[in-house]
Every structure is written in C-alpha cells, then in structure tokens.
Image (cartoon, helix red, strand yellow):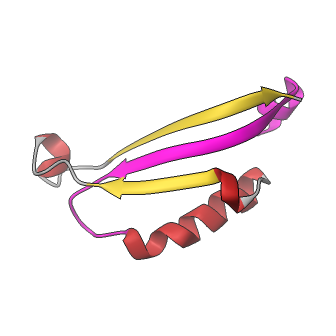
Amino acid sequence: MEKIKEEGYTVGNIDSVIALQQPKIKDQIPEMIRTLATVMEVDEKIVSIKATTTEKLGFVGREEGIEAYAVVLLHRA
C-alpha cells in the first residue's frame, strides 16, 4: 500500500479467489475481508473474496496445498 500511494494511485476494488478442498472457509470470509480492508486502509465494500474447490484436480484437489489469486483495480489519484 505504501508503494501504491507513493506512485499516486488508490485502490478501486480487489477481487480475489482462494482455491482449496478443505477446510471450508465460507464462514471466515467476512473476517478476511475486514482484516484486508483494515490493513490496506480501504472500505470493506471494495474487497471481494470468493472460495472454490478444484473438483479434486491437481495438487489443490489432492489437498497438498491451496491457491490464491487476486486482481486489483488501481486508479491514478
């Protein structure tokens, strides 16, 4: 966030996905959103976190790890 601000940008929105088989994290997503919004000093309304499985495919499906993806829209301030 320091670098984003230094370069003259603000966060427009954050869209993220966490892929894992277990545990189910649906109930923890609101807390994750609150935590990210607080740390990043943005409104919770612009933070989206979704959880999915890989239908037992790959290392995630074999429960050997998880994947996380995020796309952030930046606006020049």
| 76 shown above or below 35 | above
| 46 shown above or below 77 | below
- Who's the residue at 50% across and 39% down the image? 70
Count the numbered circles shown: 0
Q: Quadrant of the C terminus?
A: top right
Q: Tell me which segment is drawn in magenta.
A: 1-25
Horizontal and vertical percent position of residue 35: 64, 64
Q: Is residue 54 magenta?
A: no
| 69 shown above or below 77 | below
- Residue 23 or residue 71, whichever sits in front: 71
Horizontal and vertical percent position of residue 59: 16, 43
Q: In this image, 45 relative to 75: left or right?
A: left
- Residue 15 or residue 8, whichever sits in front: 15
- Who's the residue at 36% across and 57% down the image? 51
Quadrant in the picture for residue 75: top right
Q: Is residue 11 magenta?
A: yes
- Who's the residue at 55% across and 64% down the image? 32
- Who's the residue at 79% across and 54% down the image? 41
Q: In this image, 15 relative to 12: left or right?
A: left
Q: In this image, 77 relative to 35: left or right?
A: right
Q: In this image, 75 relative to 54: left or right?
A: right
Q: Quadrant of the N terminus?
A: top right
Horizontal and vertical percent position of residue 18: 38, 51
- Residue 23 or residue 73, whichever sits in front: 73
Horizontal and vertical percent position of residue 61: 14, 50
